[in-house]
Image (tube, rainbow, N blue to C red):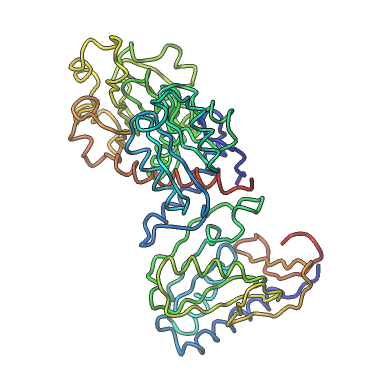
Amino acid sequence: MSKWKHKHLMDLQDTTRDDIELILETARSFKEVSSREIKKVPALRGKTVAMLFAEPSTRTRVSFELAAKRLSADTLAIQAAASSLVKGETLLDTALNIEAMNVDLVVVRHGASGAPQILANGTSMSIVNAGDGCRAHPTQALLDIFTIKEKFGSLEGVKVTIVGDILHSRVARSNIAGMIKMGAHVVVCGPSTLLPVGIEEMGVEATTDINKALKGADVVMALRMQKERQQDAFLPSIAEYVREFCITPERLKMANARALVMHPGPTNRGIEIAAEVADGPQSVILEQVTNGIAIRMAVLYLLLGRKT
Amino acid sequence: MSTIMDQEQVRRAVTRIAHEILERNKGVEDVCLVGIRTRGAVLADRLRKAIHEIEGVELPTGILDINLYRDDLTIISKQPVIRETLIDFDITDKIVVLVDDVLYTGRTIRAAFDALVDLGRPGCIQLAVLVDRGHRELPIRADFVGKNIPTAKEQVVKVCLSESDNSIDSVTVGQGGAR
């Protein structure tokens, strides 16, 4: 297997298939650690991981925090709303101050695309992108890929249908980048106003026809309707979206009988996904959450466990 | 490279260690085998088969990856690939026979102790190795040894096992280079 060469994790665009395979393989071992009575290994003892979150997050922040703790790293969480960022300090200044306290790695979430890259360029710490604007959310994509691979053994030839607000979705962008590298056939589907122009250039099939998108799908991934990013009138109404695109039990029948239902969370039940589907037997939504810790442990281990 | 053990000698050593484990523990009650990845796991599996042939009992056998417990994890330049630890039985109060191919500085075994106690509290841990080449840096000794090989520190001991190395079993000693 190839060796890990990266200092940062910004996007799956910059990683090779070998890199992704290595992360998945490492995560497989770490999943076992979380199932133990003593859920901790000493691999990152003495390392410090800071979580710098300038946007709300429960799952991702908690997941990174548990991942770091299960590797014995020390963690600190900085919420933008309760930090000097509200006093006018720039993100980079905040990061430089964190660096001055000898922190080894920063997990960043920011509403502006490219914010993590600014920290990677401006500091000497390792940076992990935990979601930047509409651009990328690599660990979410990795845990989605991990979950699919665990169920099907491989992504080669697997039809993955991503439904919803593709335009604003960093989860969709990272998943497309990663899944295509892993050999999946990715279809994106949503109202035409929420399908980015030129998305086909990423190697996906784009359609506004939900029936066509779901037909024969092995994985159905519903994206959260991002109300906070809907200031501009992309949709006539939420009710219309529900009528046309909500993943209902009836619609799900168009996919393969053993198709997986996925959602990156948080879910708006009854909007992008029906409650019966989210809680149904095909749903792996909570397994995605469990696998998220293993993936983040693998990423932290690979970035911090190397000689510096 | 000079050959220290050939296929037959490796086979006899494994059979003898199997007998010694049974003799020391007066049977197989509460005994389990845990091999350290990669070649220790192969040897543990061979011991399991050998003990099955002698006693007709299948011992619980697991695989331990000790890399996360290494004391040099963040200073070695070649980052180890982490593999799964596969121990699907409770080791608490069991006699755990830890199996590895070569006993050298003892640091791998120290890491294995840490890894094991995170999984449970064994009644006791015994150590079985195919080769003891000396040069311990920690106060650790093996309970069962296939062969003691006096070596110089700069020498390299190479163990090949058919299951893991795609060649016939052998133990060879050569000069220089990292093991």
Taking depth in this image into account, of A265 and A88 the one nearest to the observer is A88
Q: Quadrant of residue A196?
A: top left
Q: Residue at x 68, y 62 (%)?
A: B167
The quadrant of the rendering that contains the C terminus of chain B is bottom right
The correct choice, above or below, for A211 with respect to A69 in the image is above
The quadrant of the rendering that contains the N terminus of chain B is bottom right
Taking depth in this image into account, of B35 and B154 the one nearest to the observer is B154
User: Picture coordinates of residue B109 (x, y %)?
Assistant: 57, 70
Number of marks present in the image shown: 0
Taking depth in this image into account, of A171 and A257 the one nearest to the observer is A171
Q: Residue at x 33, y 11 (%)?
A: A193
User: Picture coordinates of residue B46 (x, y %)?
Assistant: 55, 73
User: Picture coordinates of residue B38 (x, y %)?
Assistant: 58, 62
Taking depth in this image into account, of B49 and B21 the one nearest to the observer is B21
Q: Residue furthest front?
A: A87
Q: Residue at x 35, y 27 (%)?
A: A161
Q: Quadrant of residue A96?
A: top right
Left or right, residue B52 beside residue B136: left
User: Picture coordinates of residue A296 (x, y %)?
Assistant: 44, 43
